Image (cartoon, rainbow, N blue to C red):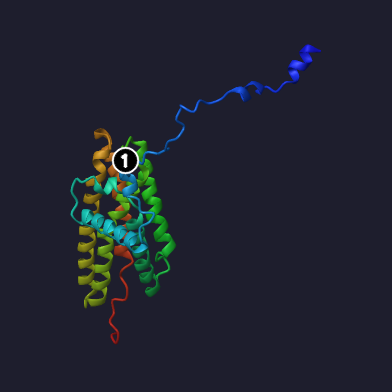
Amino acid sequence: MAEAEESAKPLFAGLSDVSISEDIPVEGEITVPVGTRSQDEDSSTLDEPVKETIMRDLKAVGKKFVHVMYPRKNSALLRDWDLWGPLILCVTLALLLQGESADSKEEGAPQFAEVFVIIWFGAVIITLNSKLLGGTISFFQSLCVLGYCILPLTVAMLVCKLVVLLANSAVVGLIIRLVVVAAMFAWSMFASTAFLADSQPPNRKALAIYPIFLFYFVISWMILAFTTGSAQKPGKN
């Protein structure tokens, strides 16, 4: 019975007799230290207006275009990679080639989807080849460089369209287009290898550059082959 009575007592029954001396101060303030804002918080763009974000991205794309047109060993294109520029160039080139195929009556002229798939599928294959050979850059860095280096060929496409419209002789137009496309092809190759060659092992650089050569050669061939347009001027037979 005694054990039953002891077990029936509250577990903390003795705490009611505990008193706190009035001499012990119990007042005070609880303060939480507020640290200084980190650099990441200062550079956050979550509260940035949409206009400023768009302008900043456009400026970044423009700077990368400058790097391609004046290629030099600079890690900015690899460090601050993006796919906006390659997307713009790919869509522009595909639209221009599609316009040529719509104007011409050739059944083998490329369509928008075909050009789009060829460019992106080729860039992915080159990137995978680079990684298998032991390349040190990431997948998206390689796609960024390959896409931005299409810029000279896009310029060549615009020049070829102007030549087709303005040239009076088909032979002269063909020669001019051939020279322009060849020069822009060499420019694209030089720009891409300036950024990608150092990322490959020294004894495998040729294996990495050869697919890049084929990639830009196919694009150059499409530009040269499908910008014939209508060489005849209106009113001429």
Q: Is residue 199 above or below residue 104?
A: above
- Residue 236 is situated, as x and y percent measured from the top left of the image, at 28, 85
Q: Amino acid at mark 1?
A: Ile
Q: Is residue 73 above or below residue 15?
A: below
* Residue 105 visible, this angle: no
Left or right: where does residue 172 sit relative to residue 225? left
- Residue 177 is situated, as x and y percent measured from the top left of the image, at 23, 66
- Residue 113 is situated, as x and y percent measured from the top left of the image, at 44, 62
User: Which residue is at 36% across, 44% downward?
Assistant: 127
Quarter of the figure with the N terminus: top right
Outermost residue, bottom side:
235
Q: Identify the image quadrant of residue 207.
A: top left
Q: Identify the image quadrant of residue 33.
A: top left
- Between residue 47 and residue 213, name the one nearer to us: 47
* Local secondary structure at mark 1: loop
- Between residue 200 and residue 163, name the one nearer to us: 200
- How many numbered circles does the render carry? 1
Outermost residue, right side:
1
User: Which residue is at 29% across, 87% downward?
Assistant: 235
* Residue 151 visible, this angle: yes
Q: Is residue 109 above or below residue 168?
A: above
- Mark 1 packing: few (<14 Cα in 10 Å), some, or many (20+)? some
- Residue 209 is situated, as x and y percent measured from the top left of the image, at 28, 44
Residue bearing mark 1: 137
Quarter of the figure with the C terminus: bottom left
